Image: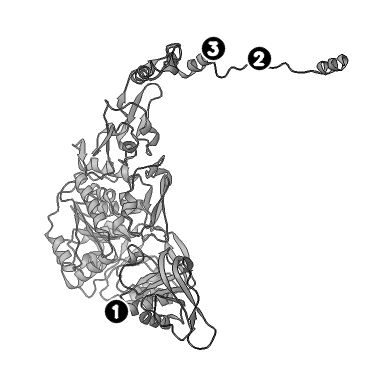
Amino acid sequence: MPKSLITCDCLGSQTIDAKGLSEATGLNVARPCSALCTTQLDRAQAALEGGDVVFCCTQEARVFEELAEGLGRPAPPSLDLRDRAGWSADDAPKLPKMSALIANAMLPAEPEKTLDVVSEGLCLILGPAEVALEAAEQLKDHLGVTVLIEDGELPDTRAFDVVVGKLRRATGAFGGFEVVIDALQQVNPGGRGAFTLSDPRDGAVSQCDVILDLRGGTPLFPAPEKRDGYLRADPGHAPGVATAIMAASHLTGTFEKTMYVKTTPLLCAHSRAEQTGCTTCLDLCPTGAITSAGEHVAIDPMICAGCGACSAACPSGAITYDAPPVDLTMRRVQTMAKAYLDAGGTAPRLLVHDAHGTKMVRLSARHGRGLPADVIPLELTAIGAFGHAEAVAALAAGFASVTLLPGPTADIPALQSQIALITAIAGAGKATLLDTPDPDAMSDALYAEVAPAPVASPVRPVGTRRQITRQAARALHPDTDQIPLPEDAPYGAVLVDKDACTLCLSCVSLCPSGALGDNSDKPQLRFQEDACLQCGLCANICPEDAITYEPRLDLTNAALRQEVLNEEEPFACIECGALFGSKSAIDRISEKLKDHAMFSGDKLRMIQMCDNCRVNAQFHATDNPFAGGERPRVRTTDDYLSKRRDH
């Protein structure tokens, strides 16, 4: 039995085409209510008792959840049609947009992968004595508090711990911080009069669950607002200090930490044979959660804040966003585009935003112009995870343009880099970064945009992000063979200087993606452009500096084949005629060694032999190093008995 949508026109402030929605979505859409959350609450109760329902109102979701609880029913899902579609100054029909939003909501959600984090409430407070000690007084009944001060009078209390010293460094995250303190002095609690301190000690190591930093100035960690368990406030700003203290008081117990990304180390192009290649994710990570681990990178899930920039930029797919998974995001944009077009709409525009963007959309809908009827909002946990592959897939699916609306914590340079790559692949005007905190400015920009023409024949490719990008680009440019890309693009060709290349094949042994290969039958360097990550490893290892790059996206079938970059005439063994090595290399080595004392006579000829013939010639040579003298005769019993007879 299909789900039932319970709609409400919110006191007549929006128009709901129940029949049209039912036909477009295949769901049961009853006649709209007008005051579902108040005077018509009985209709909500009847719907809950009747079966599987979705309430098209998120504003009063709490009311429907409480009603369901009273009826012994599970909490019903809710869907916002009003703020995102119904409340709009645009007079165009809203049916295609509402159909797209409903289709997106009907997709099954992926369960989040989480990790349990246990906090015993051990809190380290840093800062000036007067502020830190006051914070400790407020927190001592909630947490196990230790105050670190560099100087000042010790308090006449043992309700919490006070130590004197200088913090050298802090590492870790919520539930697992580790601090190193120099010149540490602890209180000697015994004796009469003021407390005394122990002798100072450097390099003292301690652990805590929470750090409350009231020092002001430089934070202990990069991107401090994204480090769980690290609370920071200006000691001179009383409201900020109070807020931090309140937040700290709740950080005890067991918490769930979302596992934002998943990794496939075998695909990582970070390093090979101690040669550094791709460092894109290391350069982008704002929290320092990503570190080098030899030939691949490692991600500390406790430090990762889930910004998604690493997933969007990773050239190989070794790091992919998992909250939600990349393939679900692809399905969402493709599903919304199809539903919009199937409902009779043309040239939809996609607005990608995070939770902050949802608030802006809501404010604009209630107090301003709302969103245009052709702009479909898509909320993501982290807007940074929406990269060029997702955007190009959306454009190929039928969206006319893609606009990214970053929140206050978004990494703007990372988004700008992706916008540049989207523009290079899809064309000018196809992707925009709308960086504004003003809901009215957001609406004005969207109303003013003149959307380019959408793709003539929408496609919905599947596969890896690289495969989807290539297929989508071919749909967007059916008559184009190659697209030039920016310098840092993860697609392109390897160019080889044939005059400099000696076919040593060092590049082949290091290529992490298999884009470079050899030929077992002849001296040959082969290349498959579709697999090239432009990671830089082959250029770094080439002893002749014969390799350069050309960032581009080849849309022809040639990119899927192995093409010969360089080849030479093989050398024939002078003994058996078997082909081995390259003629130029053997000739060059022979020429260099012809006057060398150690290669006089027949030894120079061995260089011109294959492996088998060389070993055979060496074995039969008069100065064979493997040859020894005559082996001694084995002594037998007769030998020992003959000695006895002689004596």
In the depicted structure, whether residue 194 falls above or below residue 78: below
Where does the N terminus fall, quadrant-wise? Answer: bottom left
In 3D space, how far apart are the residues under numbered discs 2 and 3 (Cα atoms)? Answer: 15 Å
Q: Which amino acid does label 2 sit on?
A: Glu
Q: Which amino acid does label 3 sit on?
A: Thr
**Secondary structure of residue under mark 1:** loop
Judged left or right of residue 315, residue 434 is left
In the depicted structure, whether residue 270 falls above or below residue 378: above
Q: How many marks?
A: 3
Q: How crowded is mark 1: few (under 14 residues within 10 Å), some or many (20 or more)?
A: few
Q: Quadrant of residue 276?
A: top left
Q: Which residue is drawn at 28% across and 62% down?
A: 354
Residue 521 spot, x, y in % from top left = 40, 21
Q: How crowded is mark 2: few (under 14 residues within 10 Å), some or many (20 or more)?
A: few
Q: How crowded is mark 3: few (under 14 residues within 10 Å), some or many (20 or more)?
A: few
Return the residue at label 3.
622
Residue 478 spot, x, y in % from top left = 20, 38
Return the residue at label 1.
236
Q: In which quarter of the image is residue 151?
A: bottom left
Choose between 381 and 230: the one closer to the eye.
230
Return the residue at label 2.
630
**Secondary structure of residue under mark 3:** loop
Where does the C terminus fall, quadrant-wise? Answer: top right
Q: Earlier in the sequence, mark 3 or mark 1?
A: 1
In the depicted structure, whether residue 449 falls above or below residue 15: above
Choose between 95 and 125: the one closer to the eye.
125
Residue 490 spot, x, y in % from top left = 29, 43
